[in-house]
Image (cartoon, rainbow, N blue to C red):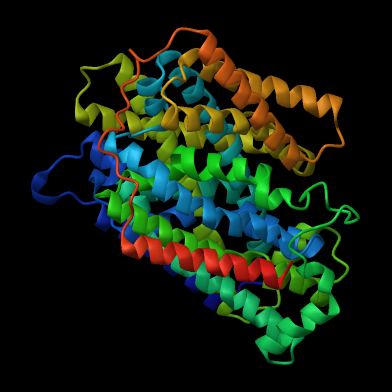
């Protein structure tokens, strides 16, 4: 795979264009200086299209594009459940979670925890999320993204890693969330267009010029790759354990990610109103339905076009090698866009949590200009640490990445318990929340050691039920925390607009059709 001058020109035009656009949309009018709300929440004025596009741009990066294509090559379409069930999760977040968050003017997830439970759980989870975002999310995106860039361009991988981190930092450093969110519509458009080109060209090669014929031939030749629900005889059952993808642990992972994850939910918290936030969430749900076409089908197509790959994760880069000049440049720019947009989202959320949940708590007299400056310093520090630690943490990528995924799963059930009880059960208190957080980690370790054959997803579901019971018992056995609870639910309306309802029914109908077709 070699980039021609045309390809290089397309990539450079994208980089220059997105940088200039980010600076333009970040300008303040009439000499107005940026406040913390401007920088971290885009002045709470984001429109629906920016929210929806930014949710997807924050989510889709190198690990999704390359990793899910690799899973498509090895497992098949069943891996698409991560994307399709996320679409349904987004509807739940929009209807039941966002009304409470926006009613209470929440800016960060740790802030919600303090206002609902108390300061200890806020500090514990803020530290956890900062560590997760810097040492897991940023490092993994940088490492995987740099591998892809190095493979395509021939650059030294560490140089590619530093360039990706530096550019992602630079284009959003001045404008904050506004720079990220208002440019993400361009990033997502490029991602979708580039992904569809890869899928279309690979299927056309299988079908002698016809995309439809190529898809039908691929399905006919490898029907096992188009089974959504795996049975116990499937060698990948432990990764996707049958009906658990519909009624089990995948729900816990999705609710935690889309409902209570700062770098995801921050976009919706910055909406101009609840209606706009809900329209943005529906837009993101429709985009999630499309994602498997972009990130999974090329991997399945590689089963026919490149049947002897040494590693499944080579599927997507190998399919890129089939692209003609010009198209390769566009697709490579889309891959860079996915990496840069996702990096920028994490950087901004690290800056938000550090500034609002640590610095501002201890320096209540800090000016708005000071908070913005601290946020920028935190952003620079976060990406510098991630660049320096990416290789030591992920140099042995195959084992290191699996360990990291396992590590985050230890905490996911407890996070969901804490927030669900905080949102919907007033008797829950800080003691119960701390018990769920600590218990989630301890129970995950015990089950992993005592029951190693239990699929990862099933373990998440089981730990969730145990942590939920623990939180309820501890809350009932200790003093009520009602005096600390500052989260108001009076006046919260869960009724949604006709647009949201019709669009949600359309998403559900499409999901039912997909699972019936590919069961």
- The answer to whether 164 is drawn above or below residue 491 in the figure is below
Query: How many numbered discs?
Result: 0
Residue toward you, 166 or 24: 24
Q: Residue at x 61, y 66 (%)?
A: 512
Q: Quadrant of residue 24?
A: bottom left
Where is residue 130? Give x, y as percent: 50, 29
**Left or right side of 82 for 101:** left
Q: Residue at x 32, y 34 (%)?
A: 106
**Left or right side of 394 for 492:** left
Residue toward you, 391 or 423: 423
Locate the C terminus by quadrant: bottom right
Where is residue 78? Give x, y as percent: 73, 60
Where is residue 482? Give x, y as percent: 36, 15
Q: Quadrant of residue 231?
A: bottom right
- The answer to whether 219 is drawn above or below residue 468 in the figure is below
Q: Quadrant of residue 75?
A: bottom right
Instruction: Residue at the far right: name it.
Output: 233
Residue toward you, 440 or 499: 499
**Left or right side of 236 for 515:** left
Locate the N terminus by quadrant: bottom right
Q: Residue at x 21, y 31 (%)?
A: 369
Residue toward you, 328 or 208: 208
Where is residue 475? Give x, y as percent: 51, 15
* Visible residue check, residue 184: yes
* Visible residue check, residue 130: no
């Amino acid at each position: 795979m070699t980039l021609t001058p045309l390809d290089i020109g397309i990539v450079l035009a994208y980089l220059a264009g997105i940088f200039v656009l980010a600076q333009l949309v970040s300008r303040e009018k009439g000499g107005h200086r940026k406040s913390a709300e401007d920088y971290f929440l885009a002045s709470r004025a984001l429109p629906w299209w920016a929210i929806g596009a930014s949710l997807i741009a924050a989510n889709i990066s190198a690990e999704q594009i390359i990793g899910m294509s690799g899973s498509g090559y090895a497992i098949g379409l069943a891996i698409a459940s991560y994307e399709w069930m996320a679409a349904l999760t987004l509807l739940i977040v929009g209807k039941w979670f966002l009304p409470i968050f926006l009613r209470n003017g929440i800016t960060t997830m740790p802030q919600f925890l303090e206002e609902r439970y108390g300061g200890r759980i806020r500090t514990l989870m803020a530290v956890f999320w900062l560590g997760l975002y810097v040492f897991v999310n940023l490092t993994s995106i940088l490492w995987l993204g740099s591998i892809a860039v190095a493979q395509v361009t021939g650059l030294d991988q560490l140089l590619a890693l530093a360039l990706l981190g530096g550019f992602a930092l630079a284009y959003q450093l001045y404008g904050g969330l506004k720079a990220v969110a208002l440019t993400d519509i361009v990033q997502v458009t490029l991602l979708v267009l580039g992904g569809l080109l890869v899928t279309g060209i690979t299927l056309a090669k299988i079908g002698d010029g016809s995309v439809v014929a190529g898809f039908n031939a691929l399905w006919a030749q490898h029907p096992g790759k188009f089974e959504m629900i795996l049975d116990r005889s499937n060698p990948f059952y432990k990764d996707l354990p049958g009906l658990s993808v519909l009624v089990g642990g995948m729900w816990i992972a999705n609710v935690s990610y889309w409902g209570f994850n700062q770098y995801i939910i921050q976009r919706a918290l910055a909406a101009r109103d609840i209606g706009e936030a809900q329209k943005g969430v529906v837009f993101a749900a429709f985009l999630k339905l499309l994602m498997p076409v972009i990130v999974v089908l090329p991997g399945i197509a590689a089963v026919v076009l490149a049947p002897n790959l040494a590693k499944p994760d080579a599927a997507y880069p190998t399919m890129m090698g089939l692209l003609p000049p010009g198209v390769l440049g566009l697709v490579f720019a889309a891959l860079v866009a996915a990496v840069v947009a996702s990096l920028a989202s994490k950087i901004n959320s690290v800056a938000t949590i550090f500034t609002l949940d640590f610095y501002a708590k201890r320096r209540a007299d800090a000016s708005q200009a000071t908070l913005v400056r601290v946020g920028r310093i935190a952003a620079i520090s976060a990406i510098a640490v991630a660049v320096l630690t990416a290789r030591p943490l992920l140099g042995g990528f195959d084992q290191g990445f699996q360990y990291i995924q396992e590590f985050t799963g230890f905490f996911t059930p407890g996070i969901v318990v804490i927030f669900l009880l905080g949102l919907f059960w007033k008797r829950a208190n800080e003691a119960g929340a701390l018990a769920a957080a600590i218990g989630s980690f301890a129970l995950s370790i015990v089950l992993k050691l005592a029951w190693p054959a239990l699929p990862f997803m099933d373990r998440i579901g089981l730990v969730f039920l145990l942590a939920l019971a623990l939180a309820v018992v501890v809350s009932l056995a200790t003093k009520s925390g009602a005096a600390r609870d500052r989260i108001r639910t009076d006046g919260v309306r869960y009724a949604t607009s006709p647009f949201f309802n019709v669009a949600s029914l359309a998403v559900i109908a499409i999901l039912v059709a997909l699972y019936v077709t590919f069961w």
